[in-house]
Amino acid sequence: MNVEDTVEARPGAHNDIVSLNPDHPGFNDTVYRARRNEIARIARDYTTGQPVPLAPYTPREHAVWSHVWSELLALYPTRVCEDILALQDVVPLSTERIPQLREINRPLEAASGFRMEPVAGLVSSRMFMRFLGRRVFLSTQYIRHHSRPLYTPEPDVIHELAGHVATLAHPGIAALNLALGQAAEIATDAEMRRLGNVYWYALEFGVVEERGQLRAAGAGLLSSYGELSDFDAHSRLLDWDLDAMGETDYDPTGYQEVLFVAPSFKQMLTDVTEWVERRRWRR
């Protein structure tokens, strides 16, 4: 999920549960807006810890999932780091239909103790990360508009499942999510900003060196085939520096202008974990 300090899922114009910006590709699509509201009601009425209700996806929505997934799978062997590729069978995802959070939770909890729970849209950085500290990943269930399958500026079910589920199945990434979430419980507002930035550049848009090549490790890259295909060509690649990452803000609405490159997947996990553990978090 994108880490942002706004809340998208709120009452707005047209009595919507979810408010869409005028430049959103689905803003003028009344059918899409109705679907967003229908799926948002699941999250609005959900009680944490309960089985996640099934989202009633349409054939068109399954078709968007299948199209994007086929594009991603074509890129993964040459663009994604080996540690992430090795996790693809731990929580298997259908290539033909959108998996339900309920069915994902069984293998995910067995692998790492984490579970996915529904949320209607963007929540604050602190709220999102505090749930991580409870081994809960707040996940959207709606899917991006069919006219823009290449990339979504907001987290959708493709981002959550194709991006985060596979990474959360890794014990090191699960442990790091837990540590970041626990830090968010007691961080000052200034430290919360740094936490959010580090989360973004490591776990959302992490890039690592592997056998002399750059490989994606972050969920944002894993779920955006447009960005995954050439992130190393259109982004400014910076040296691995956790303190600089903490001070570098980001824009979640487009392709990333800046990425930080870790010397290896293992060092990315080790360095971020140590960065979190050595700071004295306090409100």
Image (cartoon, rainbow, N blue to C red):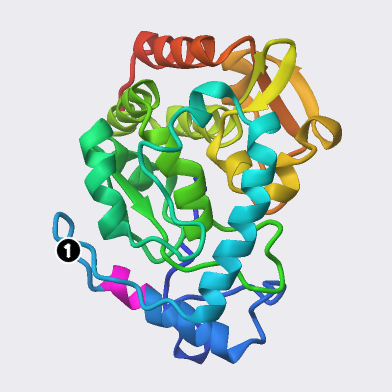
* Residue 186 as seen in the image, left or right of residue 252: left
Within 10 Å of the Cα at label 1, are there few (<14), some (14-19), or many (20+) other Cα atoms?
Answer: few
Give the image location of residue 28, x and y in percent: 67, 86
Q: Residue at x 22, y 47 (%)?
A: 106
Report the residue that reaches farthest toward the right: 233
Q: Is residue 21 magenta?
A: no
In the rendered image, is residue 1 in sight? Answer: no
Q: Residue at x 64, y 80 (%)?
A: 27
Give the image location of residue 8, x and y in percent: 49, 65
* Residue 55 as seen in the image, left or right of residue 5: left
Q: Residue at x 45, y 42 (%)?
A: 164
Rendered image quadrant of residue 100: bottom left
Q: Which residue is more in the foreground, 99 or 202?
A: 99
- Magenta stretch bounds: 40-44
Residue 147's place in the image compared with 160, above or below, is below
Give the image location of residue 5, x and y in percent: 49, 50
Q: Secondary structure at mark 1?
A: loop
**Which amino acid is tagged 1?**
Thr
Q: Which residue is more in the foreground, 178 or 71?
A: 71
Say how many tags the image has: 1
Give the image location of residue 13, x and y in percent: 53, 86
Residue 197's place in the image compared with 280, above or below, is below
Q: Quadrant of the C terminus?
A: top left
Q: Which residue is mark 1?
A: 47
Q: Residue at x 70, y 40 (%)?
A: 228
Q: Which residue is more in the foreground, 247 or 150?
A: 150
Residue 90's place in the image compared with 277, above or below, is below
